[in-house]
Image (tube, rainbow, N blue to C red):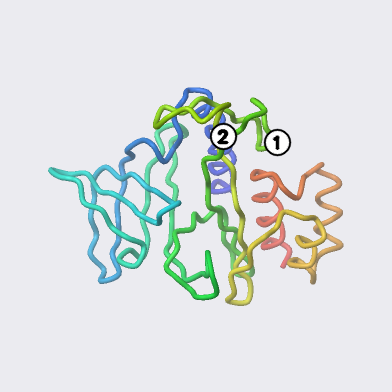
Amino acid sequence: MRYVLSLFILLISFETIAQSGVFPSQVWHKGQIVTTNGQVYQGQVKYDLENNLVQLQTNSIDTFGASNVSQFEIFDEQYGGIRTFYTLPFPLSGDYDTPVFFEILTEGDNIVLLCREHIVADNRGMGAWGGMPMNPMWGPQMGGAYKLAFSYYFIKDGKIIKYAQKKKELLDVLGDRSDEVELFMRKNRLSHDKRGDLLRITAYYNQIR
């Protein structure tokens, strides 16, 4: 429960970060990187999910690709919690599996909720992604503001399932408890496509499963 609460606080912090004009992937965080051969490196860590790269700053800056990293963690000072990313094989583009970084949002014995964040243009000023628009602190202005968007994935029965953020699909994934989950969503007014709500839904499914 404490872990879920910490992640819920993180959801609020994402909006705070956006309003301050800096995205989480644009700053250095205290953290550590664990390589595929078991080596652990500690220092300042910056991640790039778009290119599946993570950097470590000590006396110099070293760059690691996802193929060389099993996991990395950062301490996010904006909300005072640890965020954990794992490298998993997945066909992100094309038909073949490649090493990809995923953030663990919540995990249990029956299902795991994963996430990947993206920086996208928001020409409308206020988008539908949780009200997190901003002008970028990096690169040329391309018109309009920028915001964080999220892609979600489930691990169930040993398979990674990309979630298209449709309610029917969510209930199909949670099929053996879909009636109970749908009732839980209605009672708590939870949405099928909001980050914090998905975290609560997944945690609930693991609890009753």
Q: Residue furthest top?
A: 20
Residue 43 horizontal/vertical position (percent): 23, 45
Tally of numbered tags: 2
Inspect the image, locate mark 2, and give the three-letter code of the amino acid beneath it.
Answer: Lys
Residue 27 horizontal/vertical position (percent): 36, 35
**Rendering quarter of residue 146:** top right
The circle drawn on residue 14 is: none
Asked whether 183 or 65 is in front, the reply is: 65
Q: Which residue is mark 1?
A: 128
Where disc 1 sits, the SS reads loop
Residue displayed at 74% across by 67% down: 173
State the CA–CA distance, disc 2 to disc 1: 10 Å
Neighbour tally class for label 1: few under 14, some 14-19, many 20 plus, Cα within 10 Å: few
Neighbour tally class for label 2: few under 14, some 14-19, many 20 plus, Cα within 10 Å: many
Lateral position of residue 90 relative to residue 28, left or right:
right
Lateral position of residue 99 relative to residue 64, left or right:
right
Residue displayed at 60% across by 52% down: 151
Asked whether 36 or 142 is in front, the reply is: 142
Q: Which residue is mark 2?
A: 147
Residue 120 horizontal/vertical position (percent): 55, 39
Residue displayed at 30% across by 69% down: 36
Asked whether 130 or 113 is in front, the reply is: 130
Quarter of the image with the C terminus is bottom right
Residue 10 horizontal/vertical position (percent): 53, 38
Where disc 2 sits, the SS reads strand
In contact (CB < 8 Å): disc 2 and disc 1: no
Asked whether 207 or 54 is in front, the reply is: 54
Sequence order check: which comes first, mark 2 or mark 1? 1
Inspect the image, locate mark 1, and give the three-letter code of the amino acid beneath it.
Answer: Ala
Q: Residue furthest left?
A: 59
